[in-house]
Image: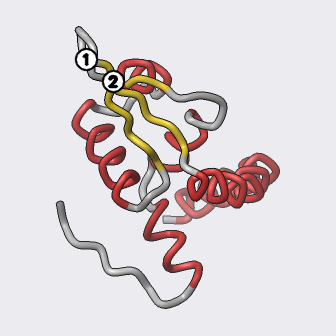
Amino acid sequence: MKSRKTSSSGIGCAFDVIGGKWKAVILRELREQALRFGELKRALPGISEKMLIQQLREMETDGIVHREVFHEVPPRVEYSQTRLGATLDAALAALAEWGDRHARRVEAARARAGAAR
């Protein structure tokens, strides 16, 4: 896994931990209950298995996701939010609300910029 340097600013640290397309969405899926890998994969259409594995590993390393292995036959693994992950998920709620409120304006601005090129 590549080494990630955490910025000294709070926003830099937050974006370092949650950066990328999938982490916030994964964290949101784990909000209500622990999920198995296959359940997460089905809940996230468009994510590759390799990307999901990579994102979960990074999130586990950062302490926002817990991976629990149940030693049974067949083996079962579940992923859940940690307390730290829940605080990050709560912080992301305002960002998600902003996106819901302003998505049309952002799309319109992008369309205008694309037409001007």
Furthest residue in direction left, as rendered:
1
Q: Is residue 9 left or right of residue 93?
A: left
List x then y, in percent, for residue 41. 39, 24
Q: Label 2 amino acid?
A: Phe
Please name the residue that numbered disc 1 is placed on: 75
Do residues under tags 1 and 2 come within 8 Å of each other at their CB atoms?
A: yes
Furthest residue in direction bottom, as rendered:
8
Q: Label 1 amino acid?
A: Pro
List x then y, in percent, for residue 58. 33, 55
Furthest residue in direction front, as rendered:
71
| Residue at x 58%, y 58% (from the top left corner) | 84
Mark 1 lies on a secondary structure that is loop
Mark count: 2
Q: Residues within 10 Å of mark 2 (few under 14, many from 20)?
A: few
12 is higher (above) or lower (below) than 88: below
- C-alpha distance separating marks 1 and 2: 6 Å
Q: Is residue 105 left or right of residue 88?
A: right
List x then y, in percent, for residue 40. 44, 26
Q: Is residue 39 left or right of residue 97?
A: left
Please name the residue that numbered disc 2 is placed on: 70
Mark 2 lies on a secondary structure that is strand
Hey, which quadrant is residue 98 in on the image? bottom right
What's the colour scheme? secondary structure
Q: Nearer the viewer, residue 105 or 73?
A: 73
Q: Quadrant of the N terminus?
A: bottom left
Hey, which quadrant is residue 36 in on the image? top left
83 is higher (above) or lower (below) than 5: above
| Residue at x 33%, y 38% (from the top left corner) | 52
